[in-house]
């Protein structure tokens, strides 16, 4: 059994230099750490960041990683490179004692340590929303991390290789059929990008024809991209339908087997590829705290402070942040919100350390962008509807602006330019094990 060490500053150290501990290095946690370094004097507080990976994953560009447009490393923002005054604790937060103000961390080395904090920022992010659907965890793939994005590209290409080598029509059809469950940003952009990848790769497989390929996008709601601007929804739906993608709304999956997906509309689709993007849920750490939650997310005040715990804040996908621009509703679980909430949480933590008043999180919607692959996209910057090449330019520009570092910006831009002037290499790399890409088990 691994011994646990409790790391606590001395009374004098605590009086002189309080500890701010951040759990999670997603958009919210990463931006909060950056902001704390900027806002705090060097000797004013110590910042600790707990993360199970050594980078921040820019999730909005994962579809381009799957498509082979972006090198996975270029989509990963190195924590140690950016955060110069933050102590990064590589490991997993296994428990939080709200009364003792401690967090237990299981480090990547296997050791377990307990860290004291004076201010806690909870930003563990989200995980794929689990479900009781039979066969989901055994046979479906998740699309949330860089390894999953890389694996799915390999898997899709492998299905074509297998189909090209067999003669049985039913077996070939199953290998050439790809089902994506969830028509939000991730699911829509993934199927749009991967459909084009397969189109480009098709000449490599002489026995396969275009009409054998089948793409199905399912969503439980009345439209894909639900709650987005109707212009974006209409354009994305029309363009994907024109490209042969079967979009089924008000439909989800009842059961998944090794070689089929059975839908709520009674249809059964023979397939070896089911990708699960049907929403996200707050990290299980949230439920373990025993705090009030809404939709599985910890309840917070508009200033991101957790009620009843004056030294604790929460932001991002794990926090039920009131949307002050739409009374009675919560802010969406988007990278745009998480980024801004992380910065606001950092400013409020600094204010609380200095005895100053905190400020509420209030956002101005900048609009949304949907990349449909190739030269097509849909966007509504500042609520101006765009489609086609103008929307593509806005989409690329937004992501380049939002990417956190100059290094990552330059590498992403280089990848995009190379994609414009050179042909993509449709190769399987085999870096990621299948188990890493499966939908995780229940909460």
Image (tube, helix red, strand yellow):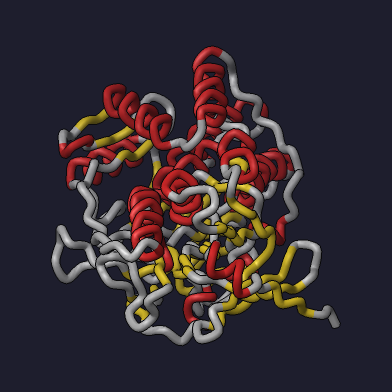
Residue at x-position 25% and y-position 60%: 359
Residue 192 location (% of width, % of height): 43, 40
Direction top: furthest residue: 421
Q: Position of residue 294 (x, y in %)?
A: 33, 78
- Foreground of the two, 214 or 42: 42
Q: Quadrant of residue 354?
A: bottom left
**Extreme right residue here?**
1
Q: Is residue 296 visible?
A: yes
Picture quadrant where residue 135 is located? bottom right
Instruction: For the C terminus, give its image quadrant.
Output: bottom right
Does 80 sit above or below residue 224? above
- The N terminus, quarter of image: bottom right
Q: Is residue 417 above or below residue 368?
A: above
Tell me the residue at 34%/60% (across/down).
351
Q: Is residue 259 left or right of residue 336?
A: right
Residue 183 shows in the view: no
239 or 384: nearer the eye? 384
351 or 139, which lies in front? 351
The percent position of residue 65, horizontal first and vertical second, equals 56, 38
Q: Residue at x 36, y 65 (%)?
A: 352
**Residue furthest front as drawn:** 12
Number of marks drawn: 0
Q: Residue at x 18, y 34 (%)?
A: 385
**Residue 243 pos. (x, y %):** 38, 35
Nearer-the-camera pick, 190 or 105: 105
């Amino acid at each position: 059994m691994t011994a646990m060490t409790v790391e606590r500053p001395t009374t004098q150290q605590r009086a002189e230099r309080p500890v701010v501990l951040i759990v999670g290095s997603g958009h919210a946690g990463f931006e909060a750490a950056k902001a704390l370094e900027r806002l705090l004097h060097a000797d004013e507080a110590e910042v600790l960041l707990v993360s199970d990976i050594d980078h921040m994953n820019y999730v909005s560009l994962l579809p381009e990683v799957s498509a082979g447009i972006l090198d996975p490393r270029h989509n990963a923002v190195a924590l140690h490179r950016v955060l110069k005054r933050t102590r990064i604790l590589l490991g997993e937060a296994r428990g939080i004692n709200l009364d003792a103000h401690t967090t237990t961390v299981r480090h990547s080395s296997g050791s377990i340590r307990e860290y004291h904090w004076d201010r806690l920022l909870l930003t563990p992010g989200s995980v794929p929303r689990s479900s009781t659907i039979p066969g989901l965890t055994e046979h479906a793939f998740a699309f949330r991390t860089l390894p999953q994005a890389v694996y799915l590209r390999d898997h899709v290409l492998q299905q074509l290789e297998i189909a090209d080598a067999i003669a049985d029509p039913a077996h070939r059809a199953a290998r050439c059929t790809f089902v994506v469950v969830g028509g939000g940003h991730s699911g829509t952009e993934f199927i749009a990008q991967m459909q084009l990848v397969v189109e480009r790769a098709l000449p490599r497989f002489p026995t396969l024809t275009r009409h054998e390929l089948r793409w199905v996008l399912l969503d439980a709601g009345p439209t894909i991209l639900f709650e987005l601007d109707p212009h974006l929804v209409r354009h994305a739906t029309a363009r994907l339908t024109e490209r042969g993608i079967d979009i089924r709304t008000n439909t989800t999956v009842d059961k998944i087997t090794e070689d089929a997906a059975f839908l709520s509309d009674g249809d059964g689709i023979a397939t070896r590829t089911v990708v699960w993007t049907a929403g996200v849920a707050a990290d299980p750490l949230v439920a373990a705290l025993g705090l009030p939650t809404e939709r599985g997310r910890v309840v917070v005040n508009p200033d991101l402070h957790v009620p009843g715990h004056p030294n604790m804040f929460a932001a991002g996908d794990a926090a039920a942040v009131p949307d002050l621009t739409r009374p009675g509703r919560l802010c969406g679980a988007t990278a745009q919100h998480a980024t801004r909430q992380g910065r606001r949480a950092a400013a409020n933590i600094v204010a609380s350390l200095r005895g100053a008043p905190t400020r509420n999180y209030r956002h101005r919607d900048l609009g949304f962008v949907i990349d449909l692959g190739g030269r097509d996209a849909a966007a509504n910057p500042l609520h101006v509807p765009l489609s086609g090449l103008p929307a593509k330019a806005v989409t690329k520009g937004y992501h380049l602006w939002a990417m956190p570092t100059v290094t990552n910006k330059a590498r992403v831009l280089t990848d995009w330019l190379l994609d414009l002037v050179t042909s993509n290499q449709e190769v399987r790399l085999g870096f990621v094990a299948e188990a890493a890409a499966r939908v995780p088990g229940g909460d």
